Image: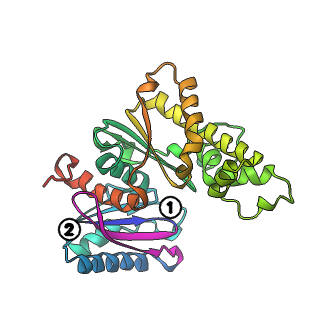
Amino acid sequence: MIGAVDIGGTKIAAGIVDADGRVLRGSQVPTNAQAGYRRAIESVVRMLRSAEKDTGQRITGIGVGSTGPVYPLTGEIGDVNFFPNWRGENPVKDLTDAFRVGVAIENDADAAALGEAGWGTGRNKTRLVYVTVGTGIGAGLIFDGKVYRGVDYSHPEIGHHLIDPSGPSCYCGFNGCWESLATGPAMEAWMAANILADDAHREKLTAEKICDLSRAGDAVARQTVEREARYLGLGLANLVTLYVPDAIVLGGSVMKSADLFLPTIHERIAASCRFVPYERTEVSLASLGDDANLIGAARVWYHRFARNGDSHGD
Ligand SMILES: [Zn+2]
């Protein structure tokens, strides 16, 4: 029974995941970063203890997925946009002290990638690229069951690879990186800039609403969706060219409307990747649903501590 913790910019979830990747009990609290790290970690301990009590199970290890950067080797939180005052705090150490079990942390995109690779649609894939598209774009690379890392266990920032240098500016300092062009907020910004000032749809545009409008035949919404599909396709084609994975697994809130984007994504990949066997890369949708983050967090523990990362390892 693995304790799973997902630390995000707006909420923190924690629960217990069994050896088959099922969430037995989970709960969540708002992150409330300003209230401080100490309060957040106390909430995590409380949620895990109450999950133990509710299920009558004992946690034998804990996996954490967190918005990054985090340092998996030391367990420390880095310079995270959402909680600037938490830098240097160490959830691995604090949870180890509280529960006396093995604890491991990874960037949340790597955690979700491990979840899909272990218990989801990426099962049995040797080379897996997981991409989540929502308010940001995150990606995790899993090769032979292991997270691909840069130097110092760093997490490559695929969401910030450059697509169009003349594109909009991004908080990372670049112009036209993938995240500035192909997220939900990027769709909202583009549509807002391209509809008439008195258009009734102007208020409260969301990616989901834009997709609904597109399905209903709204011309600008259709253009917005087509633009989104084109930029998603360009970024994914780059990943196919660079890594030629067995599978690309797509998750995140924007991908709930994947049917609108997939035809153009496939066209883009076919048009851009002629020097690699792109047709062998399977593009599929994440399969772990709303519990994906907790399931991925549990998988972080297996990845670090179980033999061969096997869910039934000792
Ligand atoms: Zn960027």
Q: How many marks?
A: 2
Q: Are marks 1 and 2 in contact (CB under 8 Å)?
A: no
Q: Which residues are magenta?
A: 10-34
Q: Who is closer to the viewer here, 132 or 99?
A: 132
For badge 1, the amino acid type reads: Val
Residue 111, numbered label: none
Amino acid type for the residue under numbered disc 2? Val
Question: Which disc, if any, is residue 80?
Answer: 1
Vertical position of residue 160 compared to residue 246: above or below: below
User: What crowding class fits label 1: few (fewer than 14 Cα within 10 Å), some (14-19), or many (20 or more)?
Assistant: some
What mark, if any, has residue 101 been given in the picture?
2
The quadrant in which the N terminus is found is bottom left
81 sits left or right of 123 in the view = right
Quadrant location of residue 198? bottom right
Q: Position of residue 129 (x, y in %)?
A: 41, 40
Image location (x, y in percent) of residue 292: 39, 57
Q: Residues within 10 Å of mark 2 (few under 14, many from 20)?
A: some
Q: Is residue 157 magenta?
A: no
Q: Is mark 2 within 8 Å of ligand 1?
A: no
Judge left or right: residue 176 versus residue 306.
right
Judge by depth and name the residue closer to the eye, 270 or 100: 270
Q: Quote the CA–CA distance across marks 1 and 2.
A: 26 Å
Percent x, y of residue 151: 38, 43
Foreground mark, 1 or 2, reads 2
Q: Quadrant of the C terminus?
A: bottom left
Disc 1, SS: loop
Quadrant of the rendered image containing residue 56: bottom left
Q: Is 294 or 35 nearer to us in this picture?
A: 294
Q: How is the image coloured?
A: rainbow
Q: Residue at x 70, y 53 (%)?
A: 213
Which residue is most to the front?
216
